[in-house]
Amino acid sequence: MPLQDDFEAIVRPDEPLAPHTWLHVGGPAEYFAEPRSPDELAALVRRCRDDELPVRILGGGSNILVRDEGVPGVVIRLADPGFADIERLGRRLTAGGGAKLGHLISTAVREGLAGLEALVGIPGTIGGALHGNAGSRGGDVGQWASRATVMTAAGEVVERARDELVFAYRQSSLDELVILSAEFELDEEDPDELTKRMQKQWIVKKASQPLGHQSAGCIFKSPSGLNAGVLIDQAGLKGTRVGGAEVSDRHANFIIAEPGATSHDVLRLIDLVRSRVADRSGVELELEIEVW
């Protein structure tokens, strides 16, 4: 029996993925699912395992480039409010994997809990942020994580304590299928001071990044001791276009996808940037975004 027949309320076939990503390009998912509870999610995951259907988890879509051909298998998004709860207990905040990182940061600041405010302006969900250890010059999200609850590809729920969590530059040991929730241990501080600090960080980011355009987060990881945006700028690539895709003239590590752009345009521009940077500086840039 087709998957959508057994999960009719939560599964849609041939769902366009472009509207679910920041770049707004790419083809459809073979199946697109929005489960309403962890139990429903587990049942769906187990069915996908039995049917040998590949499964991907879509967070905020800020670090994803979907190919024009689309994505085979099942793309799951934790859009139900039940996956986005944020609760405080003392110096700790617990957040669902589907919660927006921005909501967690604003809650922490309002509650007088310090540490996450340096990450203001980073898009995406808690699950995606932890999986890729999202961060900025002020630190990364993993340094504050004290516990995580995950779901495996077999649909089993497992707790990961702090000593099981390993975070490095834009990567983590949280490679299970789904991050259901996470706990963050923060420092107490005056909410007014935290608000001022967060606002300063936001002003700096807003001035230097194309936050209002059809762009993803940073396209490339910064090599050790170097800055990817600077390397791209030094190669004279700001404003370079391929089809409807353009290297941002505000921050060279961002690509703008204009209306009518295709995923192929973005991929060709990525290849061009990598080639030019390698020719000029000898540095091979590594992607920070995921290509589906």
Image (tube, grey):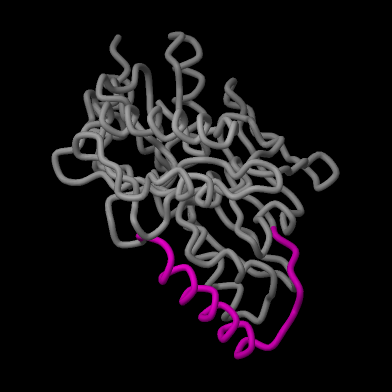
Relative placement, left or right, of 245 versus 137 is left
Residue located 73% across and 43% down the image: 167
Task: Report the front residue among 167 and 90.
Answer: 167
Relative placement, left or right, of 62 versus 185 is left
Depicted 213 relative to depicted 131: above or below: below
Residue 12 coordinates in the image, percent (x, y): 25, 29
Q: Main secondary structure of the magenta part?
A: helix
Q: Per the image, is 202 magenta?
A: yes
- Image quadrant holding the C terminus, namely top left
Q: Residue furthest left?
A: 260
Residue located 30% across and 29% down the image: 11
Q: Residue furthest front?
A: 280
- Image quadrant holding the N terminus, namely top left
Residue located 24% across and 27% down the image: 27
Q: Which segment is the magenta one?
A: 184-210
Depicted 199 relative to depicted 129: above or below: below
Task: Report the front residue among 194 and 226.
Answer: 226
Task: Report the front residue among 121 and 285.
Answer: 285
Residue 232 coordinates in the image, percent (x, y): 47, 45
Residue located 56% across and 63% down the image: 86
Q: How many marks?
A: 0
Q: Per the image, is 117 magenta?
A: no
Q: Residue furthest right?
A: 163
Residue 4 coordinates in the image, percent (x, y): 28, 22
Residue 266 coordinates in the image, percent (x, y): 31, 34
Quadrant of the rendered image containing residue 65: top left
Relative placement, left or right, of 174 versus 180 is right
Quadrant of the rendered image containing residue 171: top right
Relative placement, left or right, of 59 versus 181 is left
